[in-house]
Amino acid sequence: MEDQLQQVIREKILLAAESPVPKLTRRDVAFPLIAGKAAAVIGMRRAGKTTFLHQIRGDLMAGGRSAEGLVYFNFEDERLGSFEAGSLHEIPEMHARLFPEAAKGKVTLFLDEIQRVPGWEVFVRRMLDTPEYELFLSGSSAKLLSREIATSMRGRAWEIEIYPFSFAEFLRHHGHEMPEDPRQLTSRKATEMDHYFGEFLTIGGFPEAQGLNVADRRQLLQGYVDVLLLRDVIERHEVANPTALRWMVRRLLGSPAGLFSVTKFATDLKSQGIAAGRETLYELLGHMEDAFLLSAVTVATDSEKRRQVNPRKVYPADTGLIPVFDRSGKANTGHALETAVFIELQRRGAEVAYVKTPGGFEVDFLATYRDGTKDLIQVCANPDDPATLTREIRALEDAAPAFPKAGQLLLTLEFRLPFPEVPKPARILPAWQWMLMGENHSAA
């Protein structure tokens, strides 16, 4: 006779097998299917990890696989609150009882939010040693999954990071026509892209935020952050100073693309009567990065000491979060643009730093791509002011001797006809065009 846990497992497996693949906006995420490796899908809550798992299920079914052999199981279920690693074997065993014919062939397990089960990696390793099984895992914690994969799975996982919609995915979701070649557009089509890109910067890329009015969207995104802080930071890491955490969140998300010094922030907290040491604040910052809420970028240098003493530039996970926390009342378009460019660099797998030049200028990004090529990138919302354009180009020129093989890009908010002339090898183009050109197009 089945106990209560087995009944829940039965219900979830049957429901997943009987439910059609949900309608979804296709994500542009490429990855290799490597025998003997688990695919670990990671990213911030509500960014689309579950939808991506269903996309993979749909692709496999389109390729001839039966739904009965594709086992989707989500661990974010209050009925599984006491689920332990020792019970994970119940999932494939229950599947074999329910679908004995499907269990004789290849079985794919989609284990969603698997990190909620302590010790899960031992079970996954055992499944990978069984040739009939392939696995897709998902989780909302970069360090948790990465640490357990590295220490217990010994290189047997391939990480796939899911972000909120890219600009291309945003266009697809809203049914807007994608240009075949973003470099060859009429002025009318380019102006249309300008409009859509402005909407993208304001709305952001969280799938559930699309189509909502301003008030509902802000409430939704505020809820995302609240749940993330509670579950993925405070509860997961047993944070003893939630007050300092919330002050830090307001500071960082309210000042996107800004410089952040832990030492200075500790002093600011002290002036407000909040005690929090530098070590605690560094830990909190790390926890928020771990949960994908934000990313902190260090200065480009080979010196670890210089990295430590210079402030970090901090970017939120999505531009849609900026108006939720920015109390200035301004549009903040420049910071939203810089944030969108940074997220696109992350999506392309680039290592990103900012540059302080010998002449005292700052270059927004030094991007080092997976093939070893580099780009120096300045983000300038409006290049029409000659003094602004001169300053941006001067920063690129001042940084160039330290990175002689790097391409030079100046990315703007909108299309211009003609664009202001810039000295070679620098190139100037709208950020949306660069995004739609894809990761195979650098400035080098």
Image: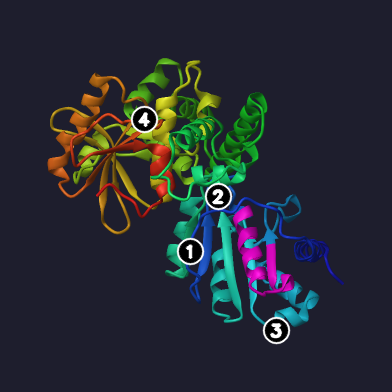
Answer yes or no: do the residues labelled 1 and 2 have beta carbons within 8 Å? no
Answer yes or no: do the residues labelled 3 and 1 have beta carbons within 8 Å? no
Residue range in magenta is 51-72
The percent position of residue 245, horizontal first and vertical second, equals 49, 31
Indicate whether 87 appears above or below 231.
below
Please name the residue that numbered disc 4 is placed on. 416
Q: Would residue 196 be found to the left or right of residue 85 on screen?
A: left
Callout in the foreground (1, 2):
1
Q: Give SS at disc 3.
A: loop
Please name the residue that numbered disc 2 is placed on. 140
Q: Residue at x 48, y 20 (%)?
A: 331
Name the amino acid type tagged 1.
Answer: Phe
| Gap in angstroms between the C-alphas marked 3 and 2 | 32 Å
Q: Residue at x 27, y 29 (%)?
A: 420
Name the amino acid type tagged 4.
Answer: Arg
Rendering quarter of residue 358: top left
| Gap in angstroms between the C-alphas marked 1 and 4 | 36 Å
| Gap in angstroms between the C-alphas marked 4 and 3 | 61 Å
Callout in the foreground (3, 2):
3
Q: Give the mark nearer the N terminus: 3 vs 2.
A: 3
Name the amino acid type tagged 2.
Answer: Ser
Indicate whether 380 appears above or below 58.
above
The image's mark for residue 104 is: 3
Q: Residue at x 72, y 70 (%)?
A: 67
Q: Residue at x 49, y 58 (%)?
A: 160
Say which of 383 and 42 sits in front.
383
